[in-house]
Amino acid sequence: MQKIVVAVTGASGSIYAKVLIEKLLKLSHSIEELSLLMTTNAKEVWHTEIGDESYQNLPVKYYGQQDFHAPFASGSGQYNTMIIIPCSMGTLGRIAQGVSNDLITRAADVILKERRKLICVARETPYNLIHIKNMETITLAGGIICPATPSFYSMPKTINEVAATVVDRVIDLAGLQNESFRWGK
């Protein structure tokens, strides 16, 4: 059983967060605790891209951006995995430089220091050298950079299916069993 925190930043790609949370809720038999935290910009982008505030109605534990009493703000909270989806380059940069100025960056710092799983679903294009160096720093610290780059060999038909090609990889990286398209089968 895993304890997972999903963080949503203000980068474009709210659909990735929505599809991920929906799939994680279906895998609740493998998840002891599922927590969600969103930046103010993430809520705005969600509304712009998805057209609603459905994140408010998700059956997850919800934490505010400055709620440093959240259990995953400390290693003693024993969260196994943190998924930042989508992960803005600003958030990625603050994590890479050890700046813990909000709950997302503090939780990422805790996950890295405890040698647990940090998955950053980077959402930017193109990358500049600063982005690449920050991704390298996080990778060297034990984090996983998983660009929001969909695949098409499963022949996705809808935007949700396209997003699911990224989300399914994220779920695999988190170590959860998930039914999805598998190459060669």
Image (tube, rainbow, N blue to C red):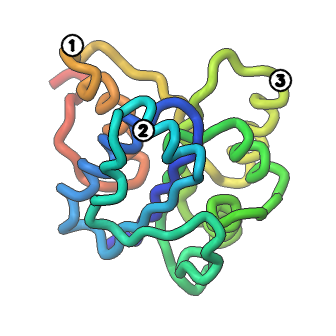
What kind of residue is marked 1?
Met
Above-or-below relation of 126 to 45? above
Q: Tag 1's secondary structure?
A: loop
Q: Which residue is depicted at the point 52% across and 55% down? A: 38
What type is the residue that disc 2 sits on? His
SS under mark 3: helix
The answer to whether 80 appears left or right of 144 in the picture is left
Question: Looking at the image, is 101 positioned above or below residue 165?
Answer: below
Dot 1 corresponds to which residue? 155
Q: Position of residue 48 (x, y in %)?
A: 45, 31
Q: Amino acid at mark 3?
A: Leu
> Of circles 2 and 3, which is in front?
2
SS of the residue at dot 2? helix
Q: Position of residue 17 (x, y in %)?
A: 40, 43
Marks 3 and 2: in contact by CB < 8 Å? no
**How far apart in space, not on screen, are marks 2 and 3 (Cα)?**
31 Å
Alpha carbon separation for disc pair 1 and 2: 28 Å
Query: Closer to the N terminus: mark 2 or mark 3?
Result: 2
Where residue 158 appears, x then y in whole percent?
21, 19
- Alpha-carbon distance for marks 1 and 3? 33 Å
What residue did someone put label 3 on?
129
Residue shown at the point (15%, 25%) measured from the top left: 185
The number of numbered badges drawn on the structure is 3
For residue 74, what is the image quadrant? bottom right
Residue 73 as seen in the image, left or right of residue 161 = right
- Please name whichever residue, 179 or 4, is drawn nearer the observer in this view of the structure: 4
User: Dot 3, how many residues are within 10 Å of its Cα: few (below 14), some (14-19), or many (20+)?
Assistant: few
Using a 10 Å C-alpha cutoff, classify the residue at mark 2 as few (fewer than 14 neighbours), some (14 to 19) or many (20 or more): some
Name the residue beneath numbered marker 2.
47
Tell which residue pokes out farthest to the bottom in this image.
76
Going from N to C along the chain, the mark reached first, 1 or 3, is 3
